[in-house]
């Protein structure tokens, strides 16, 4: 009887564990490759710090799921850790957008200069054309950021309360857990809405950084984890999964969720490797710079102007303030670095 249980009951679990271990190993290897390019080819420290969170999203999620599959008693806590990390990655996308513009103030100035407005008729209420628009002030941008940042805070509080209720009742067949799932999904939808309002701003400038692609990958990972967890937990709550000799019904739902998430994160990692490669992404600014510090001028190129040595006034010659003539500086480009020219005095021109 024991041999029959081991062979028939544990065989699907063993196959799933082996498959999840393989996919998690590949995801970790790809993450190490991504970290190498982020460390080596991104100059800005703030952008690099934000990219660390995005790069580690897939390996941390799959590792939490894999450990939960091997240690089922810890699956609930590890799923909460993975979900909180995904929520933080969603907020990091907003901070990455600010970092690429040089800060919230620079983003507001950029949008105001180009007369862009904040539109709230985005998915899922994109059909409501009667909704007002708002100016891209720093205050309004900060409010949108908080609609995204609220979800990791609420999720953490809900998971702490879930653990308290579970330790008190020693089971999860209670109405509170369903209320917790509904509150978590509502908070997630609000965060999604804030991201959909924020990300269209400055699309022209952010296109070279593949920002929209990065956001879509994070959005897909977050949605897959949240909806799958809610769906399989709901099936376990209504008794869809039978109690088995190896795992209970809730353990089966968590096992299936983690198993599916392992190969889904692998697909997201492969897509990120191809779509965000440094040759097509301006975030990796060092990758696009020439290797040599003094590049050789190419044929047919316009000769560059060289700085002339300062002109010294003739000796034994004094000038009064009334004899000097100053001309305003001429600048052909809007560069912040202004070039000034020193005009010769009247007596020097005569000489």
Image (cartoon, grey):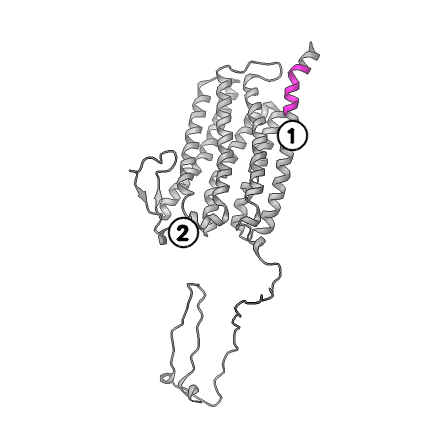
Does 342 sit above or below residue 239? below
- Magenta span includes 10: yes
- Magenta span includes 351: no
The span shown in magenta is 6-16
Of the pair 15 and 127, the residue shown nearer to us: 127
Of the pair 251 and 12, the residue shown nearer to us: 12
Q: CA distance from mark 2 to mark 1?
A: 45 Å
What residue sits 63% from the left and 37% below the top?
28
Does 310 sit above or below residue 255? below
Pointer 2 or 1: first along the chain: 1
Q: Classify the position of the C terminus by image quarter.
A: bottom left
What element does badge 1 sit on? helix
Q: Main secondary structure of the magenta part?
A: helix
What element does badge 2 sit on? helix
Q: Which residue is situated farthest in the left direction here?
A: 130
Numbered circle sitting on residue 21: 1
Give how far across and how far down residue 5 sits, in percent. Answer: 67, 13
Q: Classify the position of the N terminus by image quarter.
A: top right
Instruction: Find disc 2 in the rendering and name its residue.
Output: 105
Does 236 sit above or below residue 195? above
Give how far across and how far down residue 24 sits, in percent. Answer: 62, 33
Image label count? 2
Q: For label 1, count other residues whose C-alpha is less than 10 Å away and answer few (under 14), some (14-19) or many (20+).
A: some
Q: For label 2, count other residues whose C-alpha is less than 10 Å away and answer few (under 14), some (14-19) or many (20+).
A: some
Residue 260 falls left or right of residue 22 = left
Query: Residue 2 falls in which quadrant of the image?
Result: top right
Q: Which residue is situated farthest in the right direction here?
A: 3
Of the pair 333 and 171, the residue shown nearer to us: 333
């Amino acid at each position: 009887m024991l041999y029959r249980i081991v062979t028939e009951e544990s065989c699907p679990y063993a196959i799933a564990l082996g498959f999840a271990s393989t996919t998690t190993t590949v995801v970790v290897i790809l993450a190490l490759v991504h970290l190498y390019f982020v460390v080596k080819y991104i100059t800005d420290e703030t952008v690099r710090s934000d990219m660390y969170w995005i790069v580690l999203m897939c390996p941390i999620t799959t590792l939490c799921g894999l450990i939960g599959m091997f240690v089922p008693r810890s699956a609930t806590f590890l799923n909460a850790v993975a979900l909180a990390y995904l929520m933080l990655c969603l907020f990091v996308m907003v901070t990455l957008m600010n970092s690429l513009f040089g800060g919230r103030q620079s983003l507001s100035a950029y949008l105001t200069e180009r007369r862009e407005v904040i539109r709230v008729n985005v998915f899922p209420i994109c059909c409501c054309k009667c909704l007002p628009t708002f100016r891209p002030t720093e205050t309004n941008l900060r409010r949108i950021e908080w609609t995204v940042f609220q979800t990791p805070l609420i999720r953490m509080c809900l998971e702490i309360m879930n653990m308290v209720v579970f330790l008190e009742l020693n089971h999860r067949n209670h109405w509170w857990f369903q209320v917790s799932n509904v509150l978590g999904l509502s908070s997630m939808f609000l965060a999604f809405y804030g991201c959909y309002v924020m990300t269209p701003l400055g699309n022209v400038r952010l296109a070279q950084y593949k920002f929209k692609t990065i956001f879509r990958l994070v959005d897909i990972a977050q949605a897959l984890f949240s909806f799958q967890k809610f769906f399989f937990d709901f099936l376990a709550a209504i008794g869809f999964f039978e109690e088995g000799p190896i795992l209970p019904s809730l353990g089966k739902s968590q096992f299936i969720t983690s198993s599916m998430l392992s190969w889904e994160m692998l697909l997201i990692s492969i897509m990120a490797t191809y779509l965000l490669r440094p040759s097509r992404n301006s975030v990796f600014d060092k990758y696009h710079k020439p290797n040599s510090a003094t590049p050789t001028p190419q044929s047919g190129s316009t000769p560059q102007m060289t700085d002339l040595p300062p002109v010294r006034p003739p000796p034994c010659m004094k000038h009064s303030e009334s004899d000097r003539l100053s001309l305003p500086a001429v600048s052909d480009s809007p560069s912040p670095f202004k070039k000034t020219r020193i005009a010769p005095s009247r007596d020097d021109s005569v000489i």
